[in-house]
Image (cartoon, coloured by chain):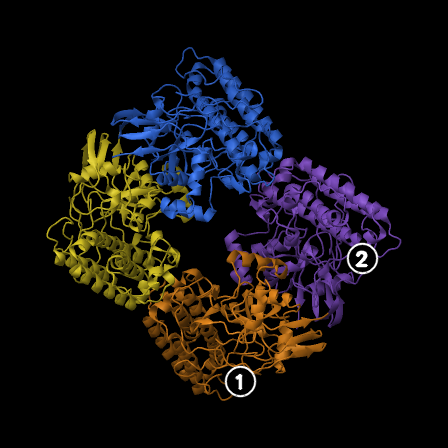
Chain colours: A yellow, B blue, C purple, D orange
Amino acid sequence: MAASAAISHFPGSFDRSAFPPPRLDARPVDREAWIAAFRTVRDETERRAAPLSPEDQQVQSMEDASPTKWHRAHTTWFFEQFLLCAHRPDYRIYDERLHYLFNSYYVQAGPRQPRFMRGMITRPTAEETRGYRTHVDVAVEALLREASSETLETILPILEIGLYHEQQHQELMLTDILHAFAQNPLGPTYDEAWRWPASDGAQGRVELSRGITQIGHDGEGFAFDNESPRHDVLVLPATIDRALVTNAQWLDFIADGGYARAELWLSDGWGKLQAEGWEAPGYWRRNEDGWSSMTLAGIRPIDPAQPVTHISYYEADAFARWSGRDLPTEAEWEIAARDGLLGDAFGHVWQWTRSAYGPYPGYRPLPGALGEYNGKFMSNQYVLRGSSIATSEGHARVGYRNFFYAHQRWQFTGLRLSDARA
Amino acid sequence: MAASAAISHFPGSFDRSAFPPPRLDARPVDREAWIAAFRTVRDETERRAAPLSPEDQQVQSMEDASPTKWHRAHTTWFFEQFLLCAHRPDYRIYDERLHYLFNSYYVQAGPRQPRFMRGMITRPTAEETRGYRTHVDVAVEALLREASSETLETILPILEIGLYHEQQHQELMLTDILHAFAQNPLGPTYDEAWRWPASDGAQGRVELSRGITQIGHDGEGFAFDNESPRHDVLVLPATIDRALVTNAQWLDFIADGGYARAELWLSDGWGKLQAEGWEAPGYWRRNEDGWSSMTLAGIRPIDPAQPVTHISYYEADAFARWSGRDLPTEAEWEIAARDGLLGDAFGHVWQWTRSAYGPYPGYRPLPGALGEYNGKFMSNQYVLRGSSIATSEGHARVGYRNFFYAHQRWQFTGLRLSDARA
Amino acid sequence: MAASAAISHFPGSFDRSAFPPPRLDARPVDREAWIAAFRTVRDETERRAAPLSPEDQQVQSMEDASPTKWHRAHTTWFFEQFLLCAHRPDYRIYDERLHYLFNSYYVQAGPRQPRFMRGMITRPTAEETRGYRTHVDVAVEALLREASSETLETILPILEIGLYHEQQHQELMLTDILHAFAQNPLGPTYDEAWRWPASDGAQGRVELSRGITQIGHDGEGFAFDNESPRHDVLVLPATIDRALVTNAQWLDFIADGGYARAELWLSDGWGKLQAEGWEAPGYWRRNEDGWSSMTLAGIRPIDPAQPVTHISYYEADAFARWSGRDLPTEAEWEIAARDGLLGDAFGHVWQWTRSAYGPYPGYRPLPGALGEYNGKFMSNQYVLRGSSIATSEGHARVGYRNFFYAHQRWQFTGLRLSDARA
Amino acid sequence: MAASAAISHFPGSFDRSAFPPPRLDARPVDREAWIAAFRTVRDETERRAAPLSPEDQQVQSMEDASPTKWHRAHTTWFFEQFLLCAHRPDYRIYDERLHYLFNSYYVQAGPRQPRFMRGMITRPTAEETRGYRTHVDVAVEALLREASSETLETILPILEIGLYHEQQHQELMLTDILHAFAQNPLGPTYDEAWRWPASDGAQGRVELSRGITQIGHDGEGFAFDNESPRHDVLVLPATIDRALVTNAQWLDFIADGGYARAELWLSDGWGKLQAEGWEAPGYWRRNEDGWSSMTLAGIRPIDPAQPVTHISYYEADAFARWSGRDLPTEAEWEIAARDGLLGDAFGHVWQWTRSAYGPYPGYRPLPGALGEYNGKFMSNQYVLRGSSIATSEGHARVGYRNFFYAHQRWQFTGLRLSDARA
């Protein structure tokens, strides 16, 4: 499996020796290694927040996005709620009222601040949020050190999911602040040094031959519940491109009337295009010198060689139709990627598949509130595979199932083409 | 394959000897048989409109529904646009302005009345619409009689799709007027004699064993483009109920807090439930004597033995989760139905599957405006299989892929349960 | 006071000898004259509905408008509710369920069909509504003949308000069906013979000199409660035009960028203009030959000599500002009209004043549900004076206070200019 | 005229010797006095912002409100745009891009950030905004010192309007942050020491006798354009309460079903009540101990003796109707206040009048963009008189015409009762 791309420009550095954490079944349990992994992930969150002013961290620019500060607090609440409150009897809750503010969508964990109101919460401040984080960090580390072996058995799976949960929010921190900055005519810069990673240069097409194979979590290392159960799939003959679709190709699509020809679009997609006035990928703006785009490094000219990004499923689908081709299924993608056949599979852009997001056969969510993590979102969304430039170190894997609504495009989303055959 | 249920209570009778029409490749072409099929379908539309006053035919009670009069005119426009204008050079268009009014969604066929404004068109009146229908009927029949053999080759596939298209609208005429009548506190009656068809009484469960098989159109008889290409699928071990879920079972679900327990619901479904105040299937109303429901025969008590209907995908999914079971995939449904293993498969209620509506591998839509028929709706919807009490005679078939959005419930939609296994 | 203009083109004719009814304090009470007045008004409603098909009578084209059938039934309900149910003990209610359907906004008279859902009620049909009207007509006439003198004292004021109420709805029947027809690209015609009445040709300006005078109902004849109490007002020096603003003047306003210059507009008006895309009065459409407009006689070219109509208060205000002038206050209008100084005051277009609609000093509404008639609308609206071509015979008077929201323009609304001075 | 109440609890103190500035026609021009007034007002803005974190200053909690930071920047832009850019040729604009961000609604001054997006602007930060303010302050003071006498003649009226403009925003800073804090379940405190000023204890009623008198700006001191021209009004006999309506009275209104009886309400008001779920004044919340309210000092129990506040016009009107009384007109209020007859006229709550906000007879706005200040809002709003606890020192005056929409209640708005007679 390909390694995820480093986001090398951040101040400080992610401790690759500490993450991922040990396997859950490793014996004896290496408490210090788990603490190190915990610290590494928690530090990375703060590292991503560091370039942002208190004002930047406050803003919620649309209902889909959340404030930086909220991400920092919510990930902390997650450990407090599911680890400390549940498994450390003498734990002193930092502030009970924060549970209402920073629960995201766990109905079983109690009522919560309405999503679209997250940006209204000015107190605690960004600085005070640091206090909340520290309080919880200290308690978690103490718990890891002091817990009995039995307790450890119980809490390590929760800790582990908490770490991957926080990494998911680390990605959202970048996509959400980019969206916020894009609302500002001044075009603020998150990181002057931000740049696309180099492509691995893979070209050509991969042929998948007909046959039964397996996809899903094979039991090695961490996976979310939605990656299970591992199960047989029948792959039909198909062809997948090794390379991602580039901005150069997308400019051809635009030039050929891609955004003006209804016959290329799904009906829902055409409705959205008209309602939103889409005529290019998200954040693109046309000026006298051609197209530029809002990026984490501010407004930059479009680079034809880079993969296109900030496109919705509707745009990916229309592009495929315009090309006389298809999007791959998630099974096709996973099989090809597992064999190392895809170029730039990780660390560039998430890749839309034509697979609607649903349960694998026999899927059952985790019991309790953590069962709300993935299962309840299994409708009306599409699966994306791979990972993006914003994905945290160690978080990309071949079986990972990301999912978004067909109209969403504030993530680093792109595509690769395939040909489906019956 | 099971026959579709007759809606026997309508005045007059559907001419079963005339429909379905001859096979397209039958030689010599039996022009009179095609004319008879055309008349049979066209008459059925008028037969369904007959109980309705001009006012009833005028009303559009929500954007998803259309006025009866609009259905009558739109199906006529379909033949005028795609058959007469395209293939009968001396055809005199009845009124050019109607093309704007009665085009539904064919972007390539020109601009059209916005969907939600269909109910604003009081002229032509219901009576005048009859004139439009007659004008087109006469011309179509003349075309069928007089066309050269070459022309006939070209137009019969269009005629055939037009017949099935009109039958689809016949079903909508019933579901749409039911929705309209349900807005009226007086609870008007479409047909006093309307009643549920008798169940075939099948009980128990069908076991599907693991294996590769084929689904999709096998080339026999008519099918829409979305039923092709026929292709291999891998069926995993599964169990499907022979019987449909009944109102009695649904009352248990309600009594057990089915509409009040968030953990049973998809997130989007729970949001819809809260926004709409759902606490029972569509049209159900609670009074001192228990539950009753608006039906085509007016307001009637809920019959526990009948299949539950007017449920959304979200409700079907929540019910399955509450039952500790699943919805079948469309492949599982088709395979079981093809072998005659399902009870009440046709003529009662459409049955939600857990399959998102998408293209079969290698699917390509028809060229031209008719290509907009099915393909452009392949996102954000779910496949339903079988047919309902409102489905027209001869329109049900085992490979038929109906589709609706997950929140929609004004159709006669129900479910059967299954167990999925990896 | 100027007479209201006849709408001479309608089939049949309004019986001018029968309306207005006798004075309430006339003794002895002339029962037959009241019955004649009742018949005259009731007949006029049916006369206005006569050109309309059942479909036309069904449609509600926006929330502000109501179906013709609804107007016919609601005016009938008014007599049933306030006259028959209240004052004729043995009266048999036609159908209790209609009270829910046809109560407009009288909260104290019970719950009612939501306003925006009036167009959903297909039953009773237009024809059945005639039965309702006849049932009530017979009972009202019997009541008028048979009531004791004491009862008569009580019911005549209610009868009288019912007659004027029905006349208000007669005007709405025309404005509402015009709006409905305007949604139809076919541009249906209500009355081919419809035309503007001749102007009285008054020109020039009227000077009002400073002084205290009285406005409001002087006790002669009928008036709504909002025209009382009569009270002193101080009139400041002002100048009022005798003529209405014409389409010719409005075309100059358009040509001078009237709809494109924000500085001419109230802020709320500019917002509305942008949201709705206003660039001309309501129903105007531009084509290659210039401007035409949807009228009761179908689509007709704009006649420069006629008064401009279908303008909102915002447009009237912007036009006045562009002209360097003002709109008159309602007091200025009434004083000038009372002295016969205004041209075309009645029977052409309602004339916006710059007076916000509020209570006269010391105003108290009628007790009971009829008190909801006028008083509860005394906010956020502006007073219009005069009457329009759609106003019923005998319904115009110098003290009449019509009122609409500043953005509304589906009525026959126009303006005359004035100059205000401190 | 009564003095406005001091908000004594703020850190630092408002320099009462420096404000209001000299009369415009004072000769010779006292440049230092103008500079002192400028500094005093500018300092007060910063003083009001001082207790707020950068996050607090960032948030926009509804479209009607604006971020603190925006107020600080917008008031600065006002001086830059209208004073420096227009009248100091060598002025170096701080950052041209800020003109887009911080123009509020001056269409003639160029395009601007959409109002509802003001909270999205995280850069410049609160701290950077201080730099903008300082840059402009230095330039304004230099201009005041160095300008020629002729220039001074031109700019002093602009400076003066800028000072009063900034004071208006000072009031909004408090009302807007209170609204923002009210969205936070934690109930943050703006100022622990905040409290209501003492009442002057006036009781009883004032009788106004019939007669002609004058209202509007008499030429003494500053006034906005909407206070002119001074003009005659006829006052009818009326009675006005000297005291404001208190919370104790309001609790009686609530207890008597004030929020549940449609007959007490204007129709638009009742609609708003139902849509918003109003059952008490803004910010009131009921708990086991009775009613409390969000205030600038956090959540505090309702004090029965204090004037009711955060009520809409609709509520004021309903309360008056429930009391069998009226709201005064703005003329009645001004006449009584001018003679010192009203208690607690200033510095407690703005008092709704029953006068719709419109132009005084002969009113003409200032030329140019500053003409957009008041005139374009003269529709659909109601006049409030007096001033509130949040009003800046020196900003209250007897002729001041404040105005808000009938549904708005985030200001410190209350009422006093009167009796109107014809």
Would residue C10 be visible to someone looking at this image? no
Of B143 and C82, the residue lying toward us: C82
Q: Is residue B321 left or right of residue D150?
A: left
Would residue A376 be visible to someone looking at this image? yes
Look at the numbered discs 1 and 2 and tell me whether their residues touch, using CB distance below 8 Å.
Answer: no
Q: Which mark is residue D25?
A: 1
Q: Is residue A300 left or right of residue C4?
A: left
Of D210 and C102, the residue lying toward us: C102
Above or below residue C172? Residue A189 is below
The residue beneath circle 2 is C221
Give neighbour class at mark 1: few <14, some 14-19, many 20+ (Cα, 10 Å).
few
Residue extending farthest to the left is: A28
Place of residue B249 in the rendered image (x, y in percent of width and height, measured from the top left): 42, 36
Place of residue C302 in the rendered image (x, y in percent of width and height, measured from the top left): 63, 47
Above or below residue A80? Residue C85 is above
Q: Chain of mark 2?
A: C
> Based on the displayed image, in which of its 4 quarters is residue B250 positioned?
top left
Q: Quadrant of the N terminus of chain A?
A: top left
Q: Is residue A152 left or right of residue D421?
A: left
Q: Name the kind of residue labelled 2 in the image.
A: Gly
Residue drawn at point x = 59 percent, y = 51 percent: C281
Label 2 sits on a secondary structure element that is loop
Of C59 and D322, the residue lying toward us: D322
> Based on the displayed image, in which of its 4 quarters is residue B59 positioned?
top right
Q: Chain of mark 1?
A: D
Give neighbour class at mark 2: few <14, some 14-19, many 20+ (Cα, 10 Å).
few
Residue drawn at point x = 55 percent, y = 59 percent: D273
Label 1 sits on a secondary structure element that is loop
Q: Which mark is residue A110?
A: none
Q: Name the kind of residue labelled 1 in the image.
A: Asp
Place of residue B216 in the rendered image (x, y in percent of width and height, measured from the top left): 33, 25
